[in-house]
Amino acid sequence: MARPVQYNTKVKTVEIPEGYSGEGFFATSFDKAIGLARKNSIWPLPFATSCCGIEFMATMASTYDLARFGAERMAFTPRQCDLLMVMGTISKKMGPVLRQVYLQMAEPRWVIAVGACASSGGVFDTYSVLQGIDQIIPVDVYVPGCPPRPEAIIDGFMRIQDLIGQESLRRRHSEKYKELLNSYGIQ
Amino acid sequence: MSLTNDYIKQRLTDKFGEAVSQVEETFGMLNFTVPKDLNLKVMQFLYDDEELQFRFLTDLTAVHYPDRKGEELAVVYHLYNFAQRVRLRMKVYTSVEDPRVFTATRLFESANWMERETYDFFGVNFVGHPNLKRILNVDEMDYFPMRKEFPLEDQSRIDKDDEMFGRGGHIGI
């Protein structure tokens, strides 16, 4: 009797980018090939300070499983990470710490603000809380909610993937990008 | 022998006379006010006395009363007697223009951080404190946020609609 071995037949592969293919070769642009690789192997850095961080734990766990999107590897060192996920209330005293973490990340880097507090200060309209992390670092995607459900965090993550996949390799060297960083007093 | 509030009151008036004022009892806890120059003397007396033995500073904070001219800031000391399990509350009033009060750090080590916190939020200047600087708020903060003249809300906010937060709009209280 055959052993009940089950093969994973539902393997999902990403679509081949636009390009030119012939006998034994395939040609496409660097932008597309590198974008494809980057967007499906994001290393997130969770910067969780409060309840949105708890939702993020659910997002990482088996039910929602962020690893399906190629983000298997959480790293807790900013130097190796591509995506800074800020989840929770950032007080003004925490601001310089967050900024330091952002500065330690290597280019290219992306930032996602998860939840009302990280996006705008949320209900904490008070003297001690930073009114949105975009006052100190540039943010790519904002996820609304207080706290957002794991689906919302995954949606935000997929939007980051879209941004990464479509990003031009020249963007980080452009004047416009340097202007953006300068407006935050970086470099 | 148990330590009663009446006895503590008696001992204080015997020792300091008229200086101890506004003596009252709320929820079984003794309250009194002393002039700010005497705060250390009274605490030392409560500490050293063999019967009173108030040797633990439970809490130290301040209250801002903007309407009381000349005594806007009240510094509140909560003292505790471990042996008899008795608490009391001592208040010292100072004006907001000259918020100088003697530090209790010589008497209680625990006063160090609590006085820093009180300085941080109310701007009480504790004379003789070894390290009087902000403890909880950002160092760049240039005001004392718990004083009543400063609104609770962050004044640097630019993207919050007051009406949506129930302030300044037509719903307001």
Image: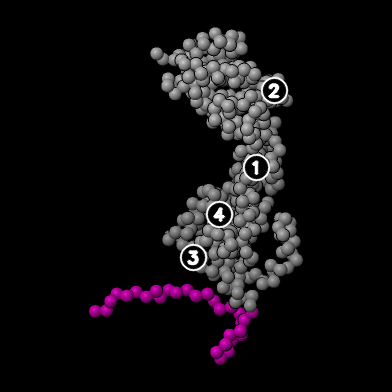
Residue with the mark numbered 3: A72
Q: Nearer the viewer, residue A73 or B17?
A: B17
Q: Give the colour scheme shown.
A: one colour
Tell which tag, 4 or 2, sits nearer the viewer: 2
Q: Residue furthest bottom?
A: A23
Specify the segment rendered in magenta.
A1-29
Q: Which residue is mark 1?
A: B138
Report x, y in % for residue A16: 56, 78
Of tags 1 and 3, the one toward the viewer is 1
Give the image quarter of residue B31.
top right
Q: Main secondary structure of the magenta part?
A: loop
Q: Which residue is mark 2?
A: B95
Could you give the CA–CA distance between mark 2 and mark 1, rounded to whole angstroms? 25 Å
Q: Are marks 3 and 4 on the same chain?
A: yes
> Which one is nearer the viewer's eye here, A68 or B46?
B46
- Rendering coords of residue B78 (x, y %): 53, 24
